Image: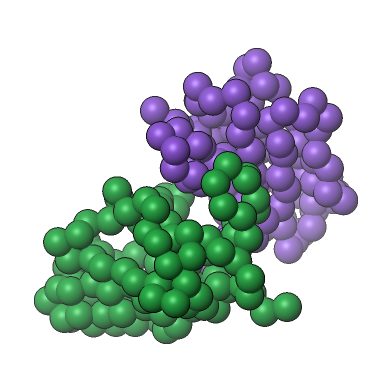
């Protein structure tokens, strides 16, 4: 069974440029997450989808970040314009459950962003 | 606030020895789930072990076991017969349901090095 797939793995862009990350969750997983991981820190939730609905986007900086999961399967996270402080790893994850399920969350390999 | 604390930023152990990684957490929830994730240099978060808070029995997965002390809000990971491949960052995490949002909250992580 394929795991969570993310692309690109690595991206270097100049500040003020846009960037987009794509994620395909494990087949059948209803819940999709985007996490931000800064160097030396644990991941922090940016947004959580249940099917195509963003049920928690309270931590997403909406002035420059946007996300979509139009058909409830794959998802795209966009940053426009990128700032130097956005340099981090962007992790996508998925889980099979909804609500208070406590199901294990499975992660992709992450997209490493460097803004110069 | 839902928090996870990993007080040891870094540890090293000799191959074949046993090591214990500590973790404490704070939550007002009575039912929750606890996890240990491993993150090698590739950056992919890999589930090591999962514990359901309502279960008193400590979870075990091969060489990995936990000591779950619910009253003390402590969740330590024991790695027996350490192997070189265990070298990685280890993150303690729990799923919080506070405010109706299911969120995986991570500690800052601990770097484990297994020496030959």
Q: Nearer the viewer, residue B82 or B108?
A: B108
Q: Position of residue B91 (x, y in %)?
A: 57, 47
State which quarter of the image contains the N terminus of chain B: top left
Could you tell whether A81 is left or right of A50 in the image? left
Q: Position of residue A83 (x, y in %)?
A: 17, 68
Residue extending farthest top: B71
- Quarter of the image for residue A107 reads bottom right
Chain displayed in green: A
Q: Position of residue A86 (x, y in %)?
A: 25, 65
Above or below, A48 against A73 in this view is: above
Chain B on-screen colour: purple
| Residue located 23% across and 72% down the image | A79
Colouring chosen for the image of the structure: by chain
Q: Nearer the viewer, residue B31 or B84?
A: B31
Above or below, A109 against B110 in this view is: below
| Residue located 28% across and 56% down the image | A60
Above or below, A15 against B27 in this view is: below
Could you tell whether B87 is left or right of A111 in the image? right
Q: Is residue A46 visible?
A: yes
| Residue located 43% across and 67% down the image | A52
Above or below, B99 against A54 in this view is: above
Q: Is residue B90 visible?
A: no
Could you tell whether B15 is left or right of A8 in the image? right
| Residue located 73% across and 48% down the image | B49
State which quarter of the image contains the C terminus of chain B: bottom right
Q: Position of residue B25 (x, y in %)?
A: 54, 29
Q: How many marks?
A: 0
Q: Nearer the viewer, residue B10 or A83?
A: A83
């Amino acid at each position: 069974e394929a795991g969570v797939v993310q692309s690109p793995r690595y991206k270097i862009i100049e500040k003020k440029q846009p960037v987009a990350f794509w994620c395909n969750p494990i087949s059948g997983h209803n819940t999709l997450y985007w996490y931000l991981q800064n160097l030396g820190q644990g991941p922090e939730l940016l947004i959580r989808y249940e099917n195509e609905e963003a049920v928690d986007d309270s931590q997403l900086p909406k002035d420059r970040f946007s996300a979509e999961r139009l058909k409830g399967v794959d998802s795209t996270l966009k940053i426009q314009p990128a700032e130097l402080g956005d340099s981090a790893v962007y992790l996508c994850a998925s889980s099979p459950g909804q609500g208070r399920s406590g199901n294990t969350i499975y992660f992709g390999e992450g997209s490493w962003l460097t803004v110069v | 606030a839902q928090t996870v604390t990993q007080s040891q930023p870094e540890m090293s152990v000799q191959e074949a020895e046993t090591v214990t990684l500590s973790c404490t957490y704070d939550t007002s929830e009575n039912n929750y789930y606890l996890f240990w994730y491993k993150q090698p240099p590739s950056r992919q978060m890999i589930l090591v072990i999962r514990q359901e808070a309502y279960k008193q029995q400590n979870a075990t997965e091969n060489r990995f076991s936990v000591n779950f002390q619910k009253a003390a809000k402590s969740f330590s990971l024991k790695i027996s017969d350490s192997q070189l491949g265990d070298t990685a960052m280890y993150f303690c995490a729990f799923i919080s349901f506070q405010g109706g949002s299911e969120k995986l909250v991570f500690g800052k992580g601990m770097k484990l090095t297994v020496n030959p």
